[in-house]
Amino acid sequence: MALRIIARVSIVALALLAPMPAARAQTSVDERGARALFAELVGINTTHDHGNTTIAARAVRRRLLAAGFPAKDIVIAGPHPVRQNLVARLRGSGARKPIILLAHLDVVEARREDWSLEPFTLTEKDGYFYGRGTSDIKNMAALFTQTMIRLKRERVPLDRDVILALTADEEGGDDNGVQWLLAKRRPLIDAEYVINGDGGDPVMRDGQVYARNVQASEKVYMDLRLEVRNPGGHSSLPVKENAIYRLSAALTRLAGYQFPARLNEVTRAYFTRAAASAPDTIAPRMRMVGETGDTTAMRRLSAGSAWFNAVLRTTCVATQLEGGHAANALPQTAAANVNCRMLPDESPDTVIETIRRLVADTAVQITVTSAAVPSPSSPLVPEVLEPIDSITASMWPGAAVVPSMETGATDGLFFRNAGIPVYGISAVALDADDIRAHGQDERIRVDAFYRGLEFTTRLVRAVAGRVGPSP
């Protein structure tokens, strides 16, 4: 994923914590199967520049075939030979539209010299699984696959098909699997909604789970280039007209501005639910935001937390800077990248006009270098939330179920724009103080992986199982 941000950690009280069971070896056939596939997937380099998702897709296909899935129900396809996607279908009665279990097979780069362990080998050590993709998100690819295998083996009556979609180029590249499947093979992945393993993590501290996030919307990404050009000259003859100074003044004006704080359906639900288990120092303000949209409470929360600030408003921030062509010459150009993360219902044109007004200088040219692709929020429907509530209460008593808005981005964007709701529901609890996705020595807790298998199996049974009398 481009950026993994969870409903943060520092905000939730530790009074109602559910202890994670002590680590133990896998004991069931499904735990053994999930671990074996997990190890195989981590062992396959699936980075964009040096790896191959097709090999990983074929590894999953072999396991599905061995479990009795018909070959016709397993498709490997894509626009590039080494960046193929897998789509497999477990057939139900068809009484309801299918659902999709979505995870991506690609991972970000990992150099051996940067790691203390081999990044493309699953290593179990001191209660943790180490390896690139252990948390982002080959864990969920393995758990979704093993859940499909178990449901088939046990012949669980299903009212709908369950579609497994394991895709390429989520982390970057020109062959994004979800985009390609929607454009070229839409019937394979047409569904009522998507369960996206790439978002909505359970979170824990000191091995204890305290929140179960459900990602129902994402902020919208947009990059702008602010650029000043002039003739330049010799640095021994400085003039007032300096491209670097002019750009700096514009960026300073932008830095002093905050977009208005406001709520949407998902963030309102987030503040309302999260307040129930938040520390006394902030719980009343969170409750006021969720229940009444109190602007003073919004201002105080966002002033004290980058997370709250990002949840409550559109943000635009300078992220890259360039300027000048020689140490002894006046700059002919100066430019900056400004990265915007907009609330889902924000108008990109309005944001650009706001920045243009703040810059207040016609010498500063503003161009869009990465256009916004807005997507609607997914409705918080009882069919999804109710089983999550009940399973969470059973597995992690006291943990709050919190609808959340992703401040980064996932492939859910493309499904939402295609009219298919997406719910980020990862099953593997992450340590709030030890988030290593995309980083050195990426890891998850061993027991969190096996508990994630239990959660995933129970959730898919609940949302896909037969709800009416047998025919």
Image (cartoon, grey):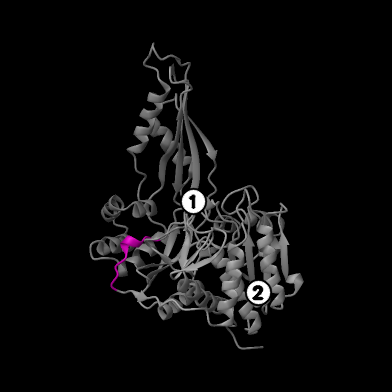
Dot 1 alpha-carbon crowd within 10 angstroms: few under 14, some 14 to 19, many 20 or more: few
Front-lying residue, 53 or 442: 442
Furthest residue toward left: 281
Select label 2 or label 1 by which is in front. 1
Distance, label 2 to label 1, CA atoms, is: 43 Å
Question: What number is the disc on residue 114?
Answer: 1
Local SS, label 1: helix
**Residue 161 has which mark?**
2
Q: Nearer the viewer, residue 378 or 62?
A: 62
Q: Which residues are magenta?
A: 7-15
Compared to 130, does 374 lie above or below? above
Residue 177 visible, this orientation? yes
The residue depicted at 41 percent of the width and 15 percent of the height is 235
Q: Residue at x 38, y 14 (%)?
A: 238
Q: Residue furthest top?
A: 237
**Residue at point 76% right, 71% down?**
71
> Please, what is the three-letter code of the amino acid marked with disc 2?
Asp
Is 59 in the magenta?
no
Could you tell me what secondary structure mostly forms the magenta stretch? loop
| Residue 36 picture location, percent across and down | 60, 72
Give how far across and how far down residue 134 sits, in percent: 52, 63
Question: What label does residue 187 carry, if any?
Answer: none
Q: Earlier in the sequence, mark 2 or mark 1?
A: 1
Q: Quadrant of residue 253?
A: top left
Specify the quadrant that holds the C terminus: bottom right
Front residue of this view, candidates 17 and 111:
111
The three-letter code of the residue at mark 1 reads Asp
> Where residue 392 sits: x, y (%)?
43, 76
Q: Is residue 177 left or right of residue 458?
A: right
Corner quadrant of residue 233: top left
